[in-house]
Image (cartoon, rainbow, N blue to C red):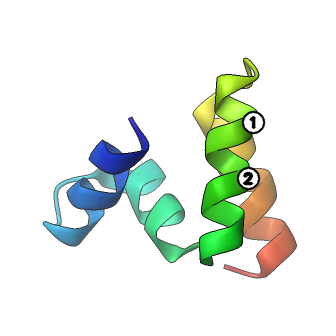
């Protein structure tokens, strides 16, 4: 799913979540994927990380 978000952003068709994911620094992307695997939902994870990293 993370790859789909990133590629969607690169191709201009991913939407807000894809844009947030693609704007994160690499270490935050890794954290997002790990947290998603832990059961958290994409919107909450990406919004929190974007806020933390000033994206």
Q: Is residue 20 left or right of residue 29?
A: left
CA–CA distance in space, label 1 to label 2: 6 Å
Dot 1: few (<14), some (14–19), or many (≥20) neighbours within 10 Å? some
Dot 2: few (<14), some (14–19), or many (≥20) neighbours within 10 Å? some
x, y percent for residue 22: 44, 68
Quadrant placement of the N terminus: top left
52 versus 8 height, above or below = below
In the rendered image, which residue does mark 2 sit on?
31
Cβ atoms at labels 1 and 2 below 8 Å apart: yes
x, y percent for residue 49: 77, 60
Residue at position x 73%, y 17% in the image: 39
Quadrant placement of the C terminus: bottom right
In the rendered image, which residue does mark 1 sit on?
35
Residue at position x 60%, y 73% in the image: 26
SS label for mark 2: helix
Q: Is residue 9 left or right of residue 27?
A: left
Nearer to us in this view, 5 or 54: 5
Residue at position x 66%, y 31% in the image: 36
Q: What is the number of callouts on the image? A: 2
x, y percent for residue 25: 62, 78
């Amino acid at each position: 799913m993370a790859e789909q978000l990133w590629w969607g952003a690169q191709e201009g068709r991913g939407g807000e979540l894809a844009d947030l994911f693609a704007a994160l620094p690499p270490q935050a992307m890794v954290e997002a994927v790990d947290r998603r695997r832990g059961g958290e939902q994409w919107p909450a994870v990406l919004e929190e990380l974007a806020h933390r990293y000033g994206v």
